[in-house]
Amino acid sequence: MKQHRLAAAVALVGLVLTGCDSQTSEVELKSPAQKASYGIGLNMGRSLSEEGMDDLDSKAVAQGIEDALAKKEPRIKDEEMVEAFTFLQNRAQERMVALSKETAEAGKKFLEENGKREGVVTTASGLQYEVIKKTDGAQPKASDVVTVHYEGKLTDGSVFDSSVARGSPIDLPVSGVIPGWVEGLQLMHVGEKYKLYIPSELAYGEQSPSPAIPANSVLVFDLELIGIKDQSKEQGQDQSAAQ
């Protein structure tokens, strides 16, 4: 996180914190501008909290906004602000590194214990799966496009994505998803339901694709392979439509 990004985020939060001595119940959220202002503050506040900035002084933020709007001289020197931003940046980085390490250790322990359960199979790559519903349907290849229903969770059971909740299965290329899915889908037969336990190195690794998925997370998917798309048939239909 760069210093100018942090400064901009703090400034945006300050836009809706000006006059923060007033009670929240007195803030009107009627006009589009008021609602947008609240939305900016809410989103940026969440972002700052996720980055370890949950102890910012809202009154100091508001004072900075007020001084800037009134064109007053800053109450602290630029060097002091840079030093403070650097401190927060380093502290946030340290917290993220610690959290990432903690998540990785917890994931390793989870997979070690999970692999001992009856019915759980661990492949050479480290992927774990169990067959929930077995069929004798066709198996997809890496070059296929498949139709699936899924629900993704962290090991604590919190759901981060679900086509089931949306009520609509999705089509996706087998080779265009995370490695754990690429391997898992090619093990399945059409009509089957699997539960996949995907190590972080077969998912997003040290990256955090969204706030709902911390870095180094083990991902758990309930996956149903509904069908394999007939690419030759679809190409023929596309050509007919074009003609």
Image (spheres, rainbow, N blue to C red):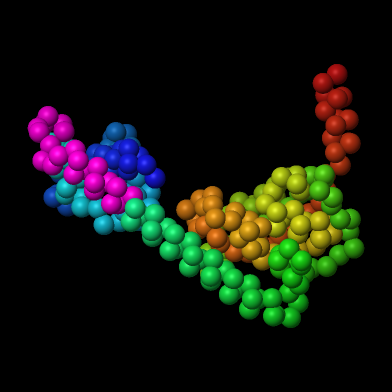
- Between 20 and 10, the residue placed more toward the observer is 10
Question: Does the magenta run of residues contain 170?
Answer: no
Q: Quadrant of the N terminus?
A: top left
Up-down relation of residue 201 to residue 71 (above or below): below
Q: Is residue 168 visible?
A: yes
The image quarter in which residue 125 lies: bottom right
* Residue drawn at the location 24% of the way across and 48% of the way down: 84
Place of residue 87 in the rendered image (x, y in percent of width and height, measured from the top left): 28, 51
Image point 52% across, 52% down: which residue? 208
Where residue 74 sits in the image (x, y, percent)?
12, 37
In the rendered image, the quadrant that contains the C terminus is top right
Q: Residue at x 43, y 63 (%)?
A: 98
Q: Is residue 5 left or right of residue 121?
A: left
Indicate whether residue 69 is drawn in magenta.
yes
Indicate whether 119 appears above or below 230: below
- The magenta stretch spans which residues? 68-89
Q: Residue furthest top?
A: 243
Residue 235: x and y in percent read 85, 32
Work out whether residue 128 or residue 45 is closer to the camera in this orientation and state it. 128
Residue displayed at 64% across by 76% down: 112
Main SS, magenta region, reads helix
Q: Nearer the viewer, residue 147 or 185?
A: 185
